[in-house]
Amino acid sequence: MQASDNREKEIKFFISDPLQMRDHILAHGARLQKERLFEVNLRFDTSQQSLRASHQVLRLRQDDHVRLTYKDQSEFSEGIADRRELEITVSDFETTQSILQALGFEVFMVYEKYRTTFTLDQCEIVIDEMPFGNFIEIEGPSADTIRSVALLLALDWEKRITTSYLDLFYRLKGQKKFSAPYLCFEYFKRLRFKEDDFTTGIDQV
């Protein structure tokens, strides 16, 4: 979600049951904004991986729309990740990919997920069904607002995750020694992870 000040402030939590969490969110007064959608995301970088080295993101996403997104390096304040996010809607996924590649950018990562989107108390809440596990992500205008929604939903603030899905993927690859090249469902059919795999050893700011 792109905020009016072009800042993305968010945290995420591992969840075990997306359907149960969906009912839980709605029971607390949230409004369903988008039903479960499949997403494919392409991450671009230079051949020297200069964007990743400077913690910048250039992403092309397709679900029911096509969006091109740029993100700055994350800052961490009051226990949440905060970064500048610039996003536009484009009309054609393949043509936009071709333009980026013509400019010298390369696809270095493909990742997929199913996302269900809600709103509650000025926050956007999403349930993300990722190839390696399920998560709830809360994005809002301030750390206090995000934390109040997390507590309302009885989420354990001490187990919040500020790390990106891609960084979690690389961390798991290093720890579990699996060989999936991309964060796509076809590579995770026989792999299962638990909450501790995503929360243990991650410093929360």
Image (tube, rainbow, N blue to C red):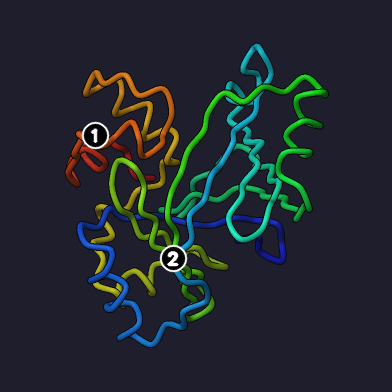
Q: Residue at horizontal 27%, vertical 70%?
A: 21
Label 1 is placed on what type of residue?
A: Gly
Q: Position of residue 118 (x, y in %)?
A: 47, 74
Instruction: Tell me where residue 130 appears, x and y as whole percent.
Output: 36, 47
Which of the 4 image quarters holds residue 163? top left
Q: Is residue 18 left or right of residue 114?
A: left
Callout in the foreground (1, 2) = 2
Locate residue 133, reporting x and y percent: 28, 47
Q: Quick one: 37 or 51, which is closer to the camera? A: 37
The reply to whether discs 1 and 2 touch (Cβ–Cβ < 8 Å) is no
Task: From the top left corner, tell me how far across and down residue 158 is, in percent.
Answer: 25, 54
Q: Residue at x 45, y 41 (%)?
A: 164
- Residue at 44 percent across and 65 percent down: it is 36
Q: Residue 73 vs residue 30: left or right?
A: right
Q: Give the labeled residue for mark 2.
A: 36
* Label 1 element class: loop
Residue lying at the far top in this picture: please name it: 48
| Comes first in the chain, label 1 or label 2 | 2
- 158 lies above or below 142: above
- Badge number at residue 124: none
The residue at the point 30 percent across, 41 percent down is 132
**Would you name the residue on which mark 1 appears?**
201
Q: Is residue 157 above or below residue 193?
A: below
Instruction: Classify mark 2: residues with Cα within 10 Å, few (<14), some (14-19) or many (20+).
Output: some
Rendered-image quadrant of the N terminus: bottom right
- Taking depth in this image into account, of 189 and 135 the one nearest to the observer is 189
Element on which disc 2 rests: strand
Amino acid type of disc 2?
Answer: Arg
Q: Which quadrant of the structure image shows residue 125?
A: bottom left
The residues tagged by marks 1 and 2 sit, at their Cα atoms, a distance apart of 31 Å
Question: Is residue 137 found left or right of 107 in the rendered image?
Answer: left
